[in-house]
Amino acid sequence: MTFLNEMLGAGSATLGYIIPFLFVLTLVIFFHELGHFLVARWTGVKVLAFSLGFGPEIVGFNDRRGTRWRLAAIPLGGYVRFAGDENAASAPDVDALERMTPDERRGSFFFAPLPARAAIVAAGPIANFLLAIVIFACVFMTVGRPATDALVDQVEPGSAAAEAGLIAGDLVTAIDGQKIRSFSDMQRIVSVSAERPLTLTVERGESELSLTATPRQRELTDNFGNKQRVGVLGVTRSTTPGNVRYETFGPIEAVTEGAKETWFVVEHTGRYLGRMVIGRESTDQIGGPIRIAKTSGDVATLGFVALINLAAILSVSIGLLNLLPIPMLDGGHLLFYAVEALRGRPLGARAQEMGMRVGLAFVLMLMIFATWNDIVHLSSLG
């Protein structure tokens, strides 16, 4: 019985990770591909298939315009396949393109005008950003956002805050001219500003002071055992009853705040990637499907709101990843179109094929590296 209980417990724990992972990933991928699909339909390009997942089809149907909607066996992505595509990566089928009749060419992606092709490709990442904005806005309208004034309760001796002159009772109202409405606002800026001087505007009694603090990089462990390096000042917030509240927003304000939240994720991710390229950040923060699955399962224990917020953050990340100028990704296609616009004609089939091969090699190496990071990360936790 003990062995059976252990097996059932392991199965239940696995489902606790798989189900939230599939929910989050499927939601994000569906809207990404839906962006491609809708703009393709709008511009008159024929869509042959809309697939969630890769590999053998589990279930599917054809709509009245001939698009095959399919759910596939490997749920780690998806694709929209257009008329004239050789494969799911939208590489051109040169032989098929040459055999097309004039009517067929009018519905082919590769014979569509350049602006239409660029719009179709860009629509996927844009849909990811819009999904994130909508999710954040809905949460802000319904549940609200926790807001605690950036009121300092304690200052850690010898910390960056102590060296800057912060004391208990100080209220931080701005950082580098950016208004601070809550302790979370302050944490967000500080966490991505390790070793970078920040100008703090502080209310102390009836006076307003300007202090300069340089957050120190520190490795912190969250409630699920995940480690990350962030900037810290060394202060704790005041948790007196009057200082803890939830803010809800009307529709217009919620959309604005949702857009700000989305931009914060974009900015934070972009800064991390930039610092990683120049060697100022470690690559161990790059994660793949295993870490996403673990994070999804962990976050799901906090409730649906936390899980849907994770979906919004992942949606932004996937949108940004796809905009990288790497062949095989949307950004690589957009790079080809930019070259085409400058040259006045597309790149040759040979050049595009070589680009796709290089892009495929890069994407595969990135996936292997991310998976290796996941394995090392999980090993360090247990």
Image: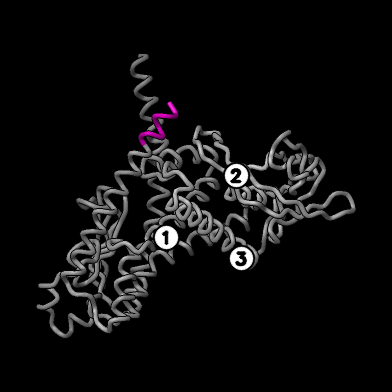
In three-dimensional space, the C-alpha distance between marks 2 and 1, rounded to whole angstroms, equals 26 Å
Residue 108 position within the rendered picture, expressed as x and y whole percent measured from the top left: 22, 77
- Foreground label between 3 and 2: 2
Q: Which residues are magenta?
A: 375-382
- Location of mark 2 (residue): 231
Mark closest to the chain's N terminus, 3 or 1: 3
Q: What colour scheme has been applied to the protein in the rendered image?
A: one colour
Nearer the camera: disc 3 or disc 1: 1
User: To which residue does mark 3 refer?
Assistant: 256
The reply, left or right, for residue 341 in relation to residue 24 is left
- Ranked by sequence position, the earlier of labels 3 and 2 is 2
State the quadrant of the C terminus. top left
Q: Circle 2 sits in a helix, a strand or a loop, which is it?
A: strand
**Is 29 in front, or is 351?**
351
Principal SS element in the magenta part? helix
Q: Residue at horizontal 14%, vertical 76%?
A: 97
Q: Residue at x 37, y 20 (%)?
A: 6
* Secondary element at image label 3: helix
Q: Nearer the viewer, mark 2 or mark 1?
A: 2
Report the amino acid beneath label 3.
Thr
Q: CA distance from mark 3 to mark 2?
A: 27 Å
Query: Looking at the image, which residue is at 60% across and 44% down?
Result: 231
**Which residue is labeled 1 in the image?**
319
Q: Is residue 377 above or below residue 125?
A: above
- What's the residue at 71%, 40% (across, down)? 235
Specify few, some or many for label 1: CA neighbours under 10 Å numbering under 14, 14-19, or 20 or more: many
Quick check: 357 above or below 194?
Answer: below
The amino acid pointed to by label 1 is: Gly
The N terminus, quarter of image: top left
Q: Give yes or no for contact between labels 3 and 1 (Cβ–Cβ under 8 Å).
A: no
- Quadrant position of residue 91: bottom left
> Looking at numbered disc 2 in the image, what kind of residue is underneath it?
Gly
